[in-house]
Image: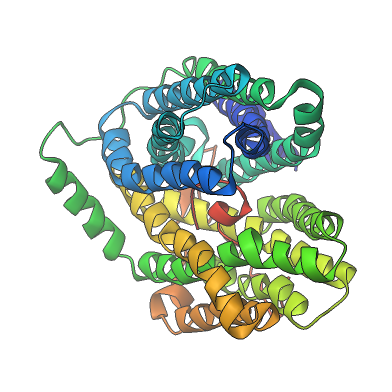
Amino acid sequence: MRRDLSIFRHRRFALLFAARTSAVLGASIGPVALAFGILGLPSGTPTRLSIVLAAESIAILLTLLIGGVIADRLPRYQVMYASDGLSAVAWGTIGVMLLTRWAPIGVLAAVAVLAGAGTGLFWPAMTGVIPEVAPSAQLQAANGFLRLGENGSRILGVAIAGAMVALVGAGWAMLINAAGFAISALLLTRLRLPRTGTIEASNIIIDLREGWQEFTSRQWLWVVVAQFSILVGGLEAFYGVLGPVVAKRELSGAASWSIVLAGESIGMLVGVVIAIRIRPRRPILAGVLLTFPLALAPLLLGLGAPVLVVAAGALIGGLCVDIFAVLWETTMQRSVPEAALSRVSSYDALGSLLLGPVGVVVAGPLAGWLGTRHALLVVAASVVVPTALALLSPGVRNMRMPAVADGDGSSIGPFVADVTVVAPLPIASAVSGSAAGP
């Protein structure tokens, strides 16, 4: 553990950790402030809120691939602080609009597009910059501690968001969101990393095709992304629509749903601690097996289990979120050439998030057709079936991590302990609150 904690002695990693903690704290306040701010306007309606959220989501999807190309061409830290700066300006503008009560829907949607573009440009660069600020032998610890800081900030942000909106108003809360991104941008400017990408300014289509070839040449990578595309669609339907509907109609409303979400959050914190320490020989196989428990919460709710039992299922699922995520990110960072890492990451994120909006859209009609509880069983199947199919892939079952150089120059295998997963111990980052996945 002391060796893992020594990662904070590296100035650049400490700066990245502080920047991400600041940005995620603000971003966790933002959704609550945005929802109550828009709904509190004289012309505020759920439809207007949906338009703004859809504009942001579409912008993320449309900018991910170009973000990968840019991050493989330029110093990645520059792309990151420019993206966070763009997000700060966008959310700050919305905060001012909410304060002044001048918020035409077209302007709100346009500014939300800028905020989404900031996110879409940021994440491919973020995946690629971690190996630049952390020694290779401590890469898994770096991914774990970054996620630990993000999870802690997310829990704190969600906990104080409602009170902040009530005390100072949605507009000021949104400005605090913007301030989190602005602080992150300022910290990232101090990284001063050299450009590590080898591609020059050329045809973007050629750059994208080269990234696609790197992505598709690894069976384990595209198979798991395809698995998560379906899985995330189902879980977005659960967390975004079906779960809250059941909680409101049949349980005690927001209080019951908060217990379920709290269980997931606790599991995520515990999962990071486990993920930092384990070293399975076959990390992708272990990670895929750990996605089966993500079906527990929707399955238990669909079967009418008590709230605390559903929360326990969500806790197990949250624990698996971050174990999978840390294993996945570390494996990709060590297996994909650094010069193409951001482009490959952009294909990973795009594929994983692609069906998320579809899941939200079809959740309502599906509940009306089958009934809400039967729709929840469909969600559970959307986790179990693609996960089982992914295990049929030899690339998933057999992928082993290449050896890396330890700090003293000796060669070590980063996944040396033989961890056998025989029972359920992530949802993708997209489902647990970040934009990248799986």
Mark count: 0
Q: Is residue 108 left or right of residue 239?
A: left
Q: Is residue 121 left or right of residue 216?
A: right
Residue sitting at 60 percent across and 84 percent down? Answer: 370
Where 310 sits versus 25, above or below?
below
Question: Which residue ends up furthest to the front in the rendered image?
Answer: 42
Q: x and y percent of residue 14 in the render? A: 61, 25
Q: Could you say which is closer to the camera, residue 58 or residue 383? A: 58
Q: x and y percent of residue 190 in the render? A: 49, 14
Residue 195 lies in quadrant: top left
Q: x and y percent of residue 180 in the render? A: 61, 23
Residue sitting at 29 percent across and 27 percent down? Answer: 74
Residue sitting at 75 percent across and 29 percent down? Answer: 165
Question: Is residue 243 among the parts visible in the rendering?
Answer: yes
Where 1 sits versus 8, above or below?
below
Residue sitting at 81 percent across and 80 percent down? Answer: 304
Q: Is residue 157 left or right of residue 394?
A: right
Coloring applied to the structure: rainbow
Where 203 sits versus 397, above or below?
above
Residue 176 lies in quadrant: top right
Question: Is residue 402 among the parts visible in the rendering?
Answer: no
Q: x and y percent of residue 17 in the render? A: 61, 30
